[in-house]
Image: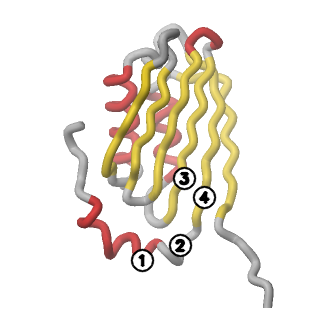
Amino acid sequence: MPGMEPASSFAELRRQEAASPKVLYAVDARCTPASPVTDADALAGLCTAAVRAGRGHVLDASHVVFPNGAITLVLILAESHLSIHTWPEENLVAIDLFSCGAIDGNLVIGELVSGLRLTAVTVRRVERGGLATNA
Protein backbone atom coordinates (compact mmCIF):
# COMPACT_ATOMS: atom_id res chain seq x y z
CA MET A 1 0.00 0.00 0.00
CA PRO A 2 1.43 3.43 -0.87
CA GLY A 3 2.59 5.56 2.02
CA MET A 4 3.86 2.72 4.20
CA GLU A 5 6.90 3.54 6.28
CA PRO A 6 9.69 1.13 7.30
CA ALA A 7 9.57 0.01 10.94
CA SER A 8 13.29 0.67 11.31
CA SER A 9 12.54 4.41 11.01
CA PHE A 10 10.72 4.32 14.34
CA ALA A 11 13.16 2.60 16.71
CA GLU A 12 13.62 5.75 18.79
CA LEU A 13 9.88 6.47 18.79
CA ARG A 14 9.18 2.96 20.13
CA ARG A 15 11.80 3.39 22.89
CA GLN A 16 10.20 6.68 23.97
CA GLU A 17 6.72 5.21 23.87
CA ALA A 18 7.64 2.20 26.01
CA ALA A 19 6.95 4.32 29.10
CA SER A 20 3.88 6.05 27.61
CA PRO A 21 0.27 5.29 28.51
CA LYS A 22 -1.26 2.50 26.46
CA VAL A 23 -4.89 2.96 25.52
CA LEU A 24 -7.44 0.85 23.67
CA TYR A 25 -10.25 2.71 21.95
CA ALA A 26 -13.04 0.20 21.27
CA VAL A 27 -15.70 1.57 18.93
CA ASP A 28 -19.05 0.04 18.01
CA ALA A 29 -21.18 1.84 15.43
CA ARG A 30 -23.83 1.57 12.76
CA CYS A 31 -22.98 2.21 9.16
CA THR A 32 -25.27 4.12 6.81
CA PRO A 33 -26.04 3.45 3.14
CA ALA A 34 -23.28 5.97 2.31
CA SER A 35 -20.66 4.17 4.45
CA PRO A 36 -17.87 2.68 2.29
CA VAL A 37 -17.69 -0.51 4.36
CA THR A 38 -17.65 -2.96 1.44
CA ASP A 39 -14.86 -1.22 -0.51
CA ALA A 40 -11.51 -2.47 0.84
CA ASP A 41 -9.44 0.20 -0.96
CA ALA A 42 -11.66 3.06 0.22
CA LEU A 43 -11.70 1.65 3.75
CA ALA A 44 -7.90 1.31 3.83
CA GLY A 45 -7.49 4.83 2.46
CA LEU A 46 -9.84 6.34 5.03
CA CYS A 47 -8.16 4.46 7.88
CA THR A 48 -4.67 5.47 6.72
CA ALA A 49 -5.74 9.12 6.43
CA ALA A 50 -7.32 9.02 9.92
CA VAL A 51 -4.13 7.61 11.45
CA ARG A 52 -2.04 10.30 9.75
CA ALA A 53 -4.45 13.00 10.96
CA GLY A 54 -3.81 11.74 14.51
CA ARG A 55 -0.03 11.98 13.93
CA GLY A 56 0.34 8.21 13.63
CA HIS A 57 2.48 6.22 11.21
CA VAL A 58 1.24 3.27 9.15
CA LEU A 59 3.89 0.57 8.72
CA ASP A 60 1.84 -2.15 7.02
CA ALA A 61 -1.71 -3.19 6.21
CA SER A 62 -3.63 -6.36 5.50
CA HIS A 63 -7.26 -7.09 4.79
CA VAL A 64 -9.68 -9.89 3.98
CA VAL A 65 -12.95 -9.51 2.09
CA PHE A 66 -15.53 -12.13 2.97
CA PRO A 67 -18.13 -13.54 0.54
CA ASN A 68 -20.89 -11.39 2.07
CA GLY A 69 -18.85 -8.22 1.47
CA ALA A 70 -17.69 -7.91 5.08
CA ILE A 71 -14.11 -6.71 5.54
CA THR A 72 -11.51 -7.16 8.23
CA LEU A 73 -8.70 -4.63 7.89
CA VAL A 74 -5.64 -4.31 10.13
CA LEU A 75 -3.13 -1.47 10.01
CA ILE A 76 0.16 -2.02 11.82
CA LEU A 77 1.24 1.31 13.28
CA ALA A 78 4.51 2.51 14.72
CA GLU A 79 2.30 3.36 17.70
CA SER A 80 0.58 -0.10 17.76
CA HIS A 81 -2.40 -1.06 15.55
CA LEU A 82 -5.85 -0.26 14.20
CA SER A 83 -8.35 -2.94 13.24
CA ILE A 84 -11.76 -2.56 11.67
CA HIS A 85 -14.38 -5.24 11.16
CA THR A 86 -17.52 -4.65 9.11
CA TRP A 87 -20.82 -6.51 8.99
CA PRO A 88 -22.66 -4.77 6.13
CA GLU A 89 -25.64 -7.15 6.33
CA GLU A 90 -26.17 -5.98 9.93
CA ASN A 91 -25.04 -2.35 9.36
CA LEU A 92 -22.38 -2.82 12.05
CA VAL A 93 -18.77 -1.67 12.32
CA ALA A 94 -16.28 -2.44 15.10
CA ILE A 95 -13.04 -0.48 15.36
CA ASP A 96 -10.17 -1.11 17.77
CA LEU A 97 -7.33 1.38 18.03
CA PHE A 98 -4.59 0.33 20.40
CA SER A 99 -2.20 3.21 20.88
CA CYS A 100 0.78 4.23 22.87
CA GLY A 101 2.62 7.50 22.90
CA ALA A 102 1.95 10.57 20.82
CA ILE A 103 -0.85 9.41 18.50
CA ASP A 104 -4.09 11.31 19.12
CA GLY A 105 -6.58 8.46 19.46
CA ASN A 106 -9.58 10.74 19.85
CA LEU A 107 -8.73 12.50 16.59
CA VAL A 108 -8.20 9.18 14.76
CA ILE A 109 -11.58 7.90 15.96
CA GLY A 110 -13.29 11.20 15.08
CA GLU A 111 -11.85 11.07 11.56
CA LEU A 112 -13.03 7.47 11.14
CA VAL A 113 -16.54 8.22 12.39
CA SER A 114 -16.80 11.15 9.98
CA GLY A 115 -15.12 9.51 6.98
CA LEU A 116 -17.02 6.25 7.35
CA ARG A 117 -20.30 8.13 7.94
CA LEU A 118 -21.07 6.18 11.09
CA THR A 119 -24.02 6.68 13.44
CA ALA A 120 -25.00 5.36 16.89
CA VAL A 121 -21.32 5.46 17.86
CA THR A 122 -20.16 4.08 21.21
CA VAL A 123 -16.51 4.59 22.20
CA ARG A 124 -14.98 2.83 25.19
CA ARG A 125 -11.52 3.98 26.29
CA VAL A 126 -9.59 1.33 28.20
CA GLU A 127 -6.24 1.97 29.87
CA ARG A 128 -3.88 -0.96 29.23
CA GLY A 129 -0.54 -2.10 30.56
CA GLY A 130 -1.21 -1.34 34.23
CA LEU A 131 -0.11 -4.70 35.57
CA ALA A 132 0.86 -4.71 39.22
CA THR A 133 4.06 -6.50 40.11
CA ASN A 134 4.18 -8.98 42.96
CA ALA A 135 7.09 -8.32 45.30
Q: Which residue is mark 4?
A: 23
Which amino acid type corresponds to the residue marked 3 in the rendered image?
A: Phe
Asked if the residues shown at circle 2 and circle 1 are in contact, with their CB atoms under 8 angstroms apart, the answer is yes
At label 4, counting other C-alpha atoms closer than 10 Å, the crowd grade (few under 14, some 14-19, many 20 or more) is some
Amino acid, disc 1: Gln
Q: Position of residue 92 (x, y in %)?
A: 62, 20
Q: Residues within 10 Å of mark 2 (few under 14, many from 20)?
A: some
Q: Earlier in the sequence, mark 1 or mark 3?
A: 1
Please tell me which residue is depicted at 24% across the width and 47% down the height of the picture. Answer: 4
Is 39 positioned to the left or the right of 122 in the image? left
120 or 9: nearer the viewer: 9
Q: Which residue is at 38% across, 17% downward?
A: 39
Q: CA distance from mark 2 to mark 4?
A: 10 Å
> How many residues crowd mark 1 within 10 Å: few (<14), some (14–19), many (20+)?
few
CB atoms of marks 2 and 3 within 8 Å: no
What x and y, as percent, mark residue 88?
56, 13
Kindly indicate whether the residue at mark 3 contacts the one at mark 4 (C-beta within 8 angstroms): yes
Which amino acid does the dot numbered 4 rest on? Val
Residue 12 drawn above or below residue 90: below
Task: Report which residue position mark 3 lands on.
Answer: 98
Instruction: Look at label 2 and name its amino acid.
Output: Ser
Instruction: Report the front residue among 4 and 36.
Output: 4
Q: Which residue is mark 1?
A: 16
Kind of element beneath mark 4 = strand
Q: How is the image coloured?
A: secondary structure
